[in-house]
Image (cartoon, rainbow, N blue to C red):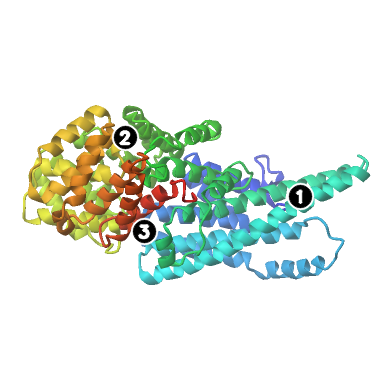
Amino acid sequence: MEPKRLGTASAAGSPERLNDAELALAGINMLLNNGFRESDQLFKKYRNNSPLMSFGASFVSFLNAMMTFEDEKMQVACDDLKSTEKLCESSEAGVIETIKSKIKKNVDMQKPSPMDVDRLQRQIIIADCQVYLAVLSFVKQELSAYIKGGWILRKAWKIYNKCYAEINSLQLMHQKKRSQESLTSDQANDNHISAESASEAALSRLKGAVSFGYGLFHLCISMVPPNLLKIINLLGFPGDRLQGLSSLMYASESKDMKAPLATLALLWYHTVVRPFFALDGMDTQSGLKEAKEILRRKEAIYPNSSLFLFFKGRIQRLECKINSALTSFQTALELATDQREIQHVCLYEIGWCSMIEMNFKDAHKCFARLKNESRWSQCYYAYLTAACQGATGETEKAQDVFKEVQKLFKRKNNQIEQFSFKKAERFQKEKPTKDLCVLAAIEVLYLWKALPNCSSSNLQRMSQACQEMHEPYSVGLKHLLLGAIHKCLGNTDGSIQFFQLAVKDEFSRQTNAYIQPYACYELGCLLLDNPEASGQGKALLHQAKEDFAGYDFENRLHVRIHAALASLSEVVPQ
């Protein structure tokens, strides 16, 4: 866009003209460098001066809502996003469309105009607003909200797709025009060259703006199993993982305000999504090289960012450098003095690192604080608090917290809360033992893909704890966990034997329904690596996918099965 100039006053009182694209980018960078309050004030000050600054203000409201889950802040975010959307659909935009349609008739018009860029900027902002409104709708976790959210996302995708194609076309046309003119023009017209360069820079920034949403769509949809796509009727097409990553990389290096957000999205993908959904099979180190390189390139821009320190901690955790990870998370926690929500994310990771180290006392402290302070899922945090407290030997106090889980169970459609509720239900009347609580902690480490982050010595301790568990109710779980632990220790034969026992355990179908399908998946993945047994491995993956339903974390497993099947040579990777 020929960016808008916003009038301000300098320290000396003389008027200055600020580029709204540069100001918006500065506001986002300010936010990521722990200046959440200052960023909010900047965007609010100029929100009525341009659609871009209005979107910046709405984005900060959205981020605040997503980090707190408070109903009041969710409503404020919805209102702000709708206000920005309305501004972009204003009569001014209608006038621009009318002028544009007339100009289009002129066959001599061979280069993008400021009106092209302004129109595209507004359309991209509208699509961004619709995506965030859909996310706020999904958070409600009601069927009508899912339907509404899915419909909004369809509209947003159509805008992204159209704008992405048009910007590429305009860039190509622009390049051809410059090439033709360079053959015939002299070098005297400096103003003309300057105008051309400005237009080229505006298109490049716009492509960065649309590439963020366009890339996120491709990346997220590429991970959704086909059966889920049919159920939610989200977009009806397979996303392209490589296209998504490429678009996000372009966006992250652009001059658009969403460049830092694209950087965070890439770090989130490489350090959270890839390992959690096992997108690279048994390779738990995949993505770390890319994540490290991103942090290296951005270190100078965000030297004291609590969010970037958080991702540094994630990388260290995945490298099994737990002490270094704890230091990073603790430093990030201290830097985020005015950002309670980022403090909570860091506390959560400190709790997990403590569980990985089997330091249940420190883990209990973190989760107990989250249970009392966080508004996200007190039910889940209560379950983690109880399991860790019981694992320290304080079983009576742990039973009291297990009883709290029942009272805090509010989000009936949330799989994490359903799991926490069912697991805690047993200890309403029956007093938990220390051994059962240790087993519960190891179970959570397995389900959240954290066992590969454990040291060999801690894995041996976990194996010993599982071996000593002889209670009939927990036999299937014991075999599943022993299979996973031996896999992490590199004992493939032992791992296969334990997973086979878990697959055959029919009792767990009534008591722990997820164990058999998860064991089928784990066994299938191990056999895929053996050329002589790959056919059997593939059959087990299909069995896990098709023969079981209605168990805990079913969607989570389906994403992992989808990734495993896509990794086979005869299946086109997404």
Horizontal and vertical percent position of residue 164: 64, 56
Residue type, numbered disc 1: Ser
Mark 3 surroundings: few (<14), some (14-19) or many (≥20) residues within 10 A: few
In terms of secondary structure, where does tag 1 sit?
Answer: helix
Residue at the far front: name it.
Answer: 532
Tell me: 188 left or right of 429. right
Comes first in the chain, label 1 or label 2: 1
Q: Residue at x 78, y 53 (%)?
A: 173
Distance in Å between CA atoms under marks 3 and 2: 33 Å
Horizontal and vertical percent position of residue 14: 71, 43
Residue type, numbered disc 3: Glu
Quadrant in the picture for residue 428 = bottom left
User: As rendered, which of 74 and 246 lies closer to the eye?
Assistant: 246
Indicate which label's residue lies in the foreground, 1 or 2. Answer: 2
Mark 1 surroundings: few (<14), some (14-19) or many (≥20) residues within 10 A: many
Tell me: 414 left or right of 155. left
Indicate which label's residue lies in the foreground, 3 or 2. Answer: 2
User: As rendered, which of 362 and 186 lies closer to the eye?
Assistant: 186
Mark 2 surroundings: few (<14), some (14-19) or many (≥20) residues within 10 A: many
In terms of secondary structure, where does tag 3 sit?
Answer: loop
Tell me: 327 left or right of 149. left
Q: Write down the residue under mark 3.
A: 70
User: As rendered, which of 378 and 110 lies closer to the eye?
Assistant: 110
Check residue 127 in the rendering and tell me which mark sits there, or answer none.
none
Check residue 453 in the rendering and tell me which mark sits there, or answer none.
2
- Location of residue 258 with respect to 113 vertically, above or below: above
Horizontal and vertical percent position of residue 507: 13, 55
- Location of residue 447 with respect to 489 vertically, above or below: below
Q: Write down the residue under mark 1.
A: 199
Instruction: Answer yes or no: is residue 316 visible.
Output: yes
